[in-house]
Image: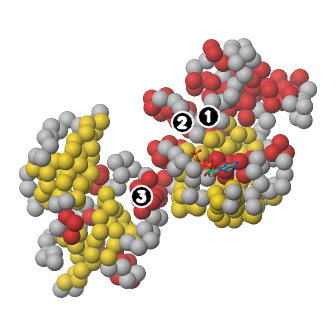
Amino acid sequence: MADVKLQNITKQFHHQTVLDNISFDVKDKEFFVIFGHAGAGKTTILNTIAGLYAPDSGQVLIDNREVTGVEPEDRNIAMVFENYALYPHYTVFENIASPLKSPKHRQPQRVIEEKVIRTAKKLNIDHLLDRKPSELSNGQRQRVGLGRALVREPEAFLMDEPLTHLDAKLRHQMRAELKEMQYHLDTTTVYVTHDYLEAMSLGDRIAILNEGKIEQIGTPHDIYYFPASEYVAQAFGEPEINLLEGHVQTEHGKHWLAIHEIGEDFLLPEDVSRTLLERGARVLSVGLRPTDIDFSRTDENGGLPGTVYSFEPLGAKAILSVKVKERIINTVTSADEELNLDERVFLKIHLDRAVFFDRDDGKFLARSKRKGGIERGRIAVD
Ligand SMILES: Nc1ncnc2c1ncn2[C@@H]1O[C@H](COP(=O)(O)OP(=O)(O)OP(=O)(O)O)[C@@H](O)[C@H]1O
């Protein structure tokens, strides 16, 4: 296996820029996820790495060797597709052996047998070699698909939404399988998805692509807790992060955040106010994850009053939307709550967990790294 590097890749189709100066470095044995909405350019990146598309500018390096002009079959990259494209009339053995029989890469029968058996053992499917794909479970089929890619001993795997059309339960199971396989096989993988949960659960690192540009590259933790932009924060999390407008105000040497939309002021964590003032940010966008807002039925500690706008039980948890003044705020509660529409409730916002963005360009400004709660109170909001 090897590392895969993209340097300043640009690609246009019909004068429309589809990839705009894309650079990243997938390390040897890394599981690297490219996340983006439909049309963001994810598949175009995979095709560029595989050599199916030539970039207009920029370089592709595999194992530090430039391959930008090299034909796909000479790149030693394996692409795994959504349906695994197994030959239905071939046995598992024949399916896995098929890449070793192509005219360009044909190998002697003895070598083929050895490689197929070794690959099947790695994937724990060596007892299934005589079966046809129709006699396999989905998980086993996936392993055969991967086995067929792996048998060529590629330098990297490229996977284009391999789990998209599976139902939720199976998808979860397959995710676990892929993860386990990755752990045992030490493969370098570039994996494309539009499902943020898949990206978070599989990726060592994730690149977030937005209309052909990379918004952020980071670990799942970085992406979730320190999103580089409002776009990233909105894409990762269900229900979506609440974004409100805040104004920094200074009184008696203390820095407060006034959120007029909900008629509430919060004392800013010191590390946050320092950063915001250094950056000269007085008006900003405040991101509050639904999980960082608690609700109660009683006004115990000066909670923020609102009324139930909707209550959506989803098994173990429920999405509670509360109308505060004219704003709808989403929170997550346990599903066994019984709440009626228009019922009066109180919210407790954990501003110490908020993420602050520039109001104009939506880029990340600050998040408190302090542990523990913050002081909270009311001052007059004009
Ligand atoms: N061969 C092509 N010719 C013309 N336009 C193309 C070609 N391939 C892709 N595009 C365009 O490039 C843009 C990015 O497409 P791409 O398939 O890379 O997106 P994606 O992020 O993989 O989307 P999806 O999740 O829908 O598969 C789209 O607007 C698409 O229409």
Note whether 377 is above or below 295 in the view shown. below
Q: Residues within 10 Å of mark 1 (few under 14, many from 20)?
A: some
Describe residue 96's horizontal placement relative to residue 208 as left or right. Answer: right
Could you say whether the residue bearing mark 3 is in a helix, strand or loop? Answer: helix
Q: Residue at x 39, y 50 (%)?
A: 237
Asked whether 117 or 15 is in front, the reply is: 15
Tell me residue 142's x, y (percent). 62, 28
Q: Residue at x 23, y 76 (%)?
A: 256
Look at 59% across and 36% down and name the residue there.
162
Q: Which mark is residue 362?
A: none
Question: Which numbered disc, 2 or 3, marks the residue that appears first in the sequence?
Answer: 2
- Badge 2 marks a residue whose secondary structure is loop
**Cα separation between marks 2 and 3:** 22 Å
Against 167, residue 238 (above or below) is: below
- Mark 3 → mark 1, Cα distance in angstroms: 27 Å
The reply to whether residue 203 is in sight is no
* Distance (Cα) linking label 2 and label 1: 7 Å
Question: Tag 1, which secondary structure?
Answer: loop
Report which quarter residue 155 is drawn in: top right
Count of marks, rendered view: 3
Q: Quadrant of the C terminus?
A: bottom left
* Residue drawn 30% across the image and 36% down it: 314
Look at label 3 and name its amino acid: Ala
Q: Which residue is mark 1?
A: 82
Q: Which mark is residue 164?
A: 2
Q: Does residue 313 appear to the left or right of 15 in the view shown?
A: left
**CB atoms of marks 2 and 1 within 8 Å:** yes
Q: Amino acid at mark 1?
A: Glu
Q: Mark 3 = which residue?
A: 233
The tag earlier along the polypeptide, 3 or 1, is 1
Q: Along the polypeptide, which appears first: circle 2 or circle 1? A: 1
